[in-house]
Image: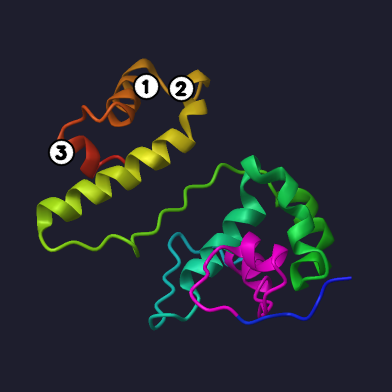
Amino acid sequence: MKGKKTLETGISDFKYIIENNRYFVDKTKLIYDFFTHGAYISLMPRPKRFGKTLNLSMIEYFFDREKENSKNLFKGLEITKQEEFCNEHQNKYPIINISLKDIKADNWEECYEKFKTEIVDLYNKHKYLLKSEHLGELEKGRFNQILNETASKTKYEYSLM
C-alpha cells in the first residue's frame, strides 16, 4: 500500500509524480481528446506553472514507443476507460517532446547554444533512425551533422522539420 500522498510543486515529469505518490489531477482524458480532435496544430496557452510541461510529459509517456513499460503509470486513470483507444495507440509512436522552459540566457548567442544542446540531445534520443529505411542518405548525413555538432546555423534552424 502506498503511503499518504504528498504535494510537490515544480515537477513536470509524469512518471516521477505517479511513481513517487504525489498528488496528480487526472487530466489523462486530454490524451484522448488531443488525439481524436483532429487538429493539425494544438495550441495550449496557459499561464506559468499551469501544468503545460506536465501535460506534454503525460502525453509522451502514453504514446512513446520507447516507453513500453509506461502502461502501469496509467492504471486507474481516466484514459484507461478508453480500452480500445489504449490498445490501438498506447506506446505505438515515436515522440518528439522538446521543452524550452529551461533555456535562460542573457544574450542571443548563449540562448542559441543552449537551443543547439536541446536539439542535439533530442537527435541523440532518436539516433535509432540512422539504421532505419525512413531516412535517405542525405537526411542521415544531416542527422549526423546535428549529432556531431558540425551542422550550420541554417541546419539547426530546420532541424525539427
Local crowd size for mark 1, using a 10 Å CA cut-off: few (<14), some (14–19), many (≥20): some
Residue type indicated by callout 2: Leu
Local crowd size for mark 3, using a 10 Å CA cut-off: few (<14), some (14–19), many (≥20): few
x and y, in percent, of residue 41 in the image: 43, 62
Q: Secondary structure at mark 1?
A: helix
x and y, in percent, of residue 122 in the image: 41, 42
Residue for badge 3: 153
Magenta part of the chain:
8-34
* Alpha carbon distance from label 1 to label 3: 17 Å
**Which residue extends farthest right?**
1
Q: Are marks 2 and 1 in contact (CB under 8 Å)?
A: yes
Going from N to C along the chain, the mark reached first, 2 or 1, is: 2
Q: Is residue 33 left or right of residue 11?
A: right
* Alpha carbon distance from label 2 to label 1: 6 Å
Q: Secondary structure at mark 3?
A: helix
Rendered position, 62 above or below 78:
above
Going from N to C along the chain, the mark reached first, 2 or 3, is: 2
Residue shown at the point (29%, 26%) measured from the top left: 148
Residue type indicated by callout 3: Lys
* Alpha carbon distance from label 2 to label 3: 21 Å
Quadrant holding the C terminus: top left
Residue type indicated by callout 1: Lys
Q: Nearer the viewer, residue 6 or 68?
A: 6
The quadrant holding residue 31 is bottom right
Quadrant holding the N terminus: bottom right
Residue for badge 2: 130
Residue for badge 1: 140
Residue shown at the point (70%, 50%) measured from the top left: 89
The quadrant holding residue 61 is bottom right
Asked if residue 35 can be seen in this view, the reply is no
**Which residue extends farthest front?**
3
